[in-house]
Amino acid sequence: MADYQNENPLTVGLEKTLHPQPCSLVIFGGSGDLSRRKLLPALYNLAFDGLLPTGFAAIGFARSEMADHEFRAFAAEGVQKFSRRRYEATHWQDFERSLFYRTASFEDPKSYAELKAALEAIESQRATLGNRVFYLAIPPTMIGLCVKQLQAAGLIYPAKQTDRFSRIVVEKPLGRDLETARKLNDELGEVFDESQIYRIDHYLGKETVQNILVMRFGNSIFEPLWDQKNIDHVQITVAEEEGVGTRAGYYEEAGALRDIVQNHILQLVCMTAMEPPYQMNAEVIRSHKLEVLRCLRPMVDEDFQRYVVRAQYAAGYCRGVEVPGYRNEQGIRPDSTTETYIAMRVFVDNWRWAGVPFYLRTGKRMAKRATEITVQYKTVPRVLFNVDAANPLEPNALSLRIQPDEGISLRISAKLPGPKVRIYPVKMDFRYGSTFGAQASPEAYERLLLEVMAGDATLFMRRDEVEAAWQWISSIQQGWARNPAKWLPEYKAGTWGPVEADRLIESDGRQWRTL
Ligand code: BG6
């Protein structure tokens, strides 16, 4: 392991320190799955690492009947199961004092009056200075109603108030198409100023996603080659081993396009393709990403035949265990045409990326969990070592592994030792785990919660970004609506997707990377 701990890492480049402010965090849907698996463990980890503000309280606000002590037991179970840091009694006892719960009926103004009274008491007990963050881990259809109720109950301070703040965090899905996204944004905008709204895409909280910008703009050797003159194509894969699990109701409506492409994959495209920001500032970064989204070439009818493939997983094996096909999963319609896999070729029509295809693919129940961005460079000229047309040199490829086994690798050509000149592709490999230690990377939600408390919106999506993403996605939705499918191609669970996706990329003379 490198000796980075004994050097002073803060002397290396820009140091950005977050200053989370004292606050109460009200978790709408606090008794739900997101809260148990992600939010409460993330808060515990922050407490463990001494990063929570001194004045802090988390208040679960949800339909289930619970008392404070039951909520604490619920949180303890989540922490024991899902926390990055181990569960330690001393840390836990400190942390659990900050947890509270109020039963909610989201439609009923009385609930909000009770919440207000509870908050006021907790605020003085926990020294949160009256600052409030409302985290909406609830279905999007409830959001409009809840924010109106918050306002009517006088729970929100206007953005211009400087002695205390109210912020709202919303989870995906942020709409199901452009129209519903606009409506949701309007509902939020009626109550909150854009500067108070934090739209989560948890991929932006991942260390390795943030490292894309450091890699691109903190090194001098990549950026000069980061364009259509040097890059042959880009591949982005978000592969999951998991199936639809217990989320049939949501997933049937969403499918891979809405669930992963509209948000996570497009954000990865933005980070890869954006122009250098002139400042690490929320508005600058988000405006640069917006430009990429606006340059995405809309899909037209001809593209659908060759360059958009959607499919569904069939029965197969994952890690040696037999698993059912999508249509046989619990809660899924037997004639469902919801895609669990999508592959496509897209273009970013601007000066830097003109003509460079971005091949995107994502799927559930694939051969393994792997999220990766690979930039494949053009081949060297067909002279010297690359004269043999039947045996061309492998082009350089730079891979950013987002998860698991986070790291960066560069494929280069090297001479095999020996008297003959024989060339072999080898990898230069940087692994976060071996360099910085396995436990070093915080979970995405830790970082994101900290950013909200610090009032930094860089890692959250601005309204115009979300709508530009939907605008482009709508060209695909409309294409599918024009040609509704009665069935989708299938791929066996535990494989890399349907043969149609191989044809998609092979028809351009390229191949999906083996991950
Ligand atoms: C969520 C999707 O946004 O991301 C899930 O709704 C998906 O379907 C998940 O499984 C993947 O996240 P991660 O962090 O495990 O890659």
Image: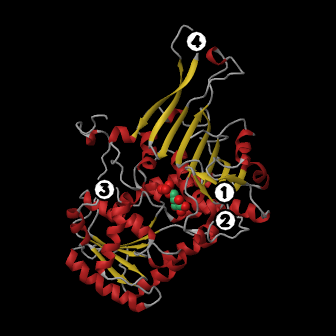
Q: Provide the residue designation for mark 4.
A: 421
Residue 137 visible in the snapshot: yes
Element at label 1: loop
Q: Residues within 10 Å of mark 1 (few under 14, many from 20)?
A: many
Which numbered circle lies on residue 85? Answer: 3
Measure how far apart labels 1 and 2 are at the Cα level. Answer: 8 Å
Q: Splitting the image into 4 quarters, where does residue 443 fall?
A: bottom left
Reading the chain from its start, which is encountered first: label 3 or label 1? 3
Q: Which residue is mark 2?
A: 328
- Proximity of marks 1 and 4: CB atoms separated by less than 8 Å: no
Amino acid residing under circle 1: Ala
Q: Marks 2 and 4, how far apart in space?
A: 55 Å
Q: Secondary structure at mark 3?
A: loop
User: Callout 3: 10 Å neighbours few (<14), some, many (20+)?
Assistant: some
Q: What amino acid does circle 3 point to?
A: Arg
Query: Which residue sits at x=49%, y=43%?
Result: 401
Query: 72 or 371: nearer the eye?
Result: 72
Determine whether 269 is above or below 144 in the image.
Answer: above
